[in-house]
Image: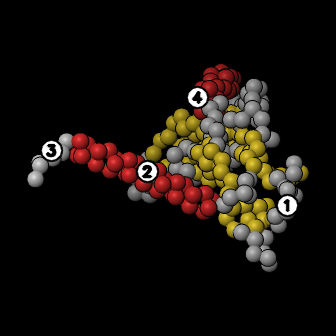
Amino acid sequence: MFRLLILFIVQSVVLNTANGHVMSMPTWCYWNKDDLSDMELIRPYIFNKINYIEFNSTLGKYVGYTELGIRNAEVWNKDTAQLQAQKAQVETYCKRNVGIYYSVVLSKTVEPQVKVKLVKKPDGSHPAVLMCSAYSFYPPLIKVTWLRNNKEFESDVTSTEEMADGDWYYQVHSHLEYTPESGEEISCVVEHASFKKPMSYKWDPSMSEPDKSKIAIGASGLVLGVVLSAAGFIYYRKKSSGRILVPT
């Protein structure tokens, strides 16, 4: 289980001096469970990239990391009202904002568009290569596997990491090297949060993508030829019906 976090910048003080000093006080919210019951708030006080003191909601107190931070922690930890106010922000700040993110961002899903195609034909000495591509999906976590006759390939598979499209969506590509056999069934199986169950996409070896393109182009040309011929015939008929014959 990976640890989730959201960083909220609640206050940042920038002191513009000759040396360019910077002081910041971000708020970190950590949790693992979907019900947010293990939410933890960390609020460090950072000066020139040095974290000298921070509040930890799990410990319920300040912890100092430098001489100044240790002295401040001793004083601030005696202020029970301040400690309670900081700890209360686990509910009022972290859980409240995370709940909003869950409802408007993390709970939204977009189904991937999946294509399976042959990218390299077998040539006797080298195997064939299929590629299964998933595009325009969200969230980025996705799983792609290959099946031959409903049995998963355990090797000869290479996959890219989930790659951002630059528009909040993601894409991933998985390659399979294999030696074709007669009567086999090759499928790409995609598991994603947008699917209620894993989706299977079969590879159709009966026709390659270039062959399909040639047939599509040829069919389009045939249809266009028929349309032009029909239009020419209709034009000829109209001209013939309107012609006046002059006796000689």
Q: Identity of the amino acid at label 1?
A: Ser
Q: Residue at x 67, y 39 (%)?
A: 5
Q: Nearer the viewer, mark 3 or mark 1?
A: 3
Task: Nearest to the eye among marks 4 and 1: give it.
Answer: 1
SS class, disc 2: helix
Q: Residue 71 location, x and y as percent? A: 67, 41
Image coordinates of residue 49 in percent, x first then y, are 58, 52
The circle on residue 104 is 4
| Mark 4 to mark 3 CA distance (whole Å) | 75 Å
Q: What colouring does the structure picture have?
A: secondary structure
User: Badges 3 and 1: C-beta atoms under 8 Å apart?
Assistant: no
The residues bearing labels 4 and 1 have C-alpha atoms spaced at a distance of: 49 Å
In the displayed structure, 212 sits above or below 95; it is below
Image coordinates for residue 79, horizontal then vertical, percent: 66, 25
Mark 2 or mark 1, which is nearer the start of the sequence? 1
Q: Amino acid at mark 3?
A: Ile
Q: Which residue is mark 1?
A: 182
Q: Earlier in the sequence, mark 4 or mark 3?
A: 4
Q: In this orientation, does residue 70 appear?
A: no
Direction from residue 224 to residue 235 in the image, left or right: left
Q: Nearer the viewer, mark 2 or mark 4?
A: 2
Q: Is label 1 in a helix, a strand or a loop?
A: loop
Residue farthest toward the bottom in the current orientation of the protein: 125
Q: Residues within 10 Å of mark 1 (few under 14, many from 20)?
A: few
Q: Which mark is first along the chain, 2 or 3?
A: 2
Q: Earlier in the sequence, mark 2 or mark 4?
A: 4
Real-space CA distance between mark 1 and mark 2, rounded to the nearest whole angstrom: 39 Å
